[in-house]
Image (cartoon, rainbow, N blue to C red):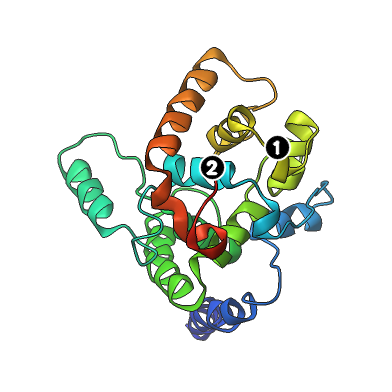
Amino acid sequence: MRRLVLAAVGIVAIPLVLTPIYLFVDPVSVPMLERYLTGRPVVRAWRDIDMISDRLKAAVIMSEDGQFCRHPGVDFAALRDEIEDLKDGRPVRGASTITMQVARNLFLWNGQSVVRKGLELPLALYVDLVLPKRRIMEIYLNIAEWGPVGQFGVAAGARAAFGIEPQNLDWRTATLLARALPNPLLRLPGQPSAEMVRIAGLIEDRARQYGERADCVGEGGRLRL
């Protein structure tokens, strides 16, 4: 019982302490640590948010979390819809926001679990409370797994897929990289399937039309698309 209590305290204390530190310190994710500890390769070159294409930022938000700039870390409307779908036996999508993915990658484990999802929600709210939206996005774009052999972050992903730096992405490369998330082991932006190209085109259309919804991560509060 004592060990369980200590484990619970640790789960709570670690994010409480580390999240404010991540205002200034560039973090390493749990999946990265797992690869380090098991001797598998990790490729990651941190890029400041202003050194990443605004097209990619818009594409990622439109693809992953269209309400990112508006919700407090959790999209409660999407979560309610998800609960209703679950009750009615309809397929569920996860309702996972970008902030929830950041919280999970920094502090939790992968794999479907009610316990993990229950921990994600308060962690995401706390992360959103402490970190500005631009910093959350910067962390996300630098810790997301973006390749099949340990590429983490958009710099490693863009190099592996297209041999270019993340500030030089055009719409095609930006949307293909966005579409690779959250499954870069199967969705290879450098070798896209016809379906992947089709979805990337839809993401581009959405980003061009509603790009202002992602302005909170732009320099000076505006993306330049």
Residue 7, compared with residue 168, is above or below; it is: below
Q: CA distance from mark 2 to mark 1?
A: 25 Å
Image-quadrant location for residue 13: bottom right
Where does the C terminus fall, quadrant-wise?
top right
Please say whether residue 108 is visible from this viewpoint.
no
Number of marks drawn: 2
The foreground one among 150 and 75 is: 75
The foreground one among 166 and 36 is: 166
- The location of residue 30, given as percent across then percent down, is 65, 60
Q: Is residue 186 left or right of residue 72?
A: right
The foreground one among 30 and 151 is: 151
Amino acid type, mark 2: Leu
Secondary structure at numbered mark 2:
loop
Q: Residue at x 15, y 39 (%)?
A: 88
The foreground one among 71 and 105 is: 71
- The location of residue 35, given as percent across then percent down, is 76, 52
Q: Residue at x 51, y 44 (%)?
A: 60
Instruction: State the mark number for residue 25.
Output: none
Secondary structure at numbered mark 1:
loop
Please say whether residue 132 is visible from this viewpoint.
yes
Q: Residue at x 84, y 51 (%)?
A: 39
- Contact, mark 2 vs mark 1 (Cβ under 8 Å): no
Amino acid type, mark 1: Gly
Q: Residue at x 62, y 76 (%)?
A: 23
- The location of residue 185, given as percent across then percent down, is 64, 33
Image-quadrant location for residue 180: top right
Q: Crowdedness of circle 2 by 10 Å Cα count: few (<14), some, many (20+)?
A: some
Instruction: State the mark number for residue 225.
Output: 2
**Residue matched to label 1:** 147
Q: Is residue 139 left or right of residue 163?
A: left
- The location of residue 71, given as percent across then percent down, is 34, 62
Image-quadrant location for residue 124: bottom left
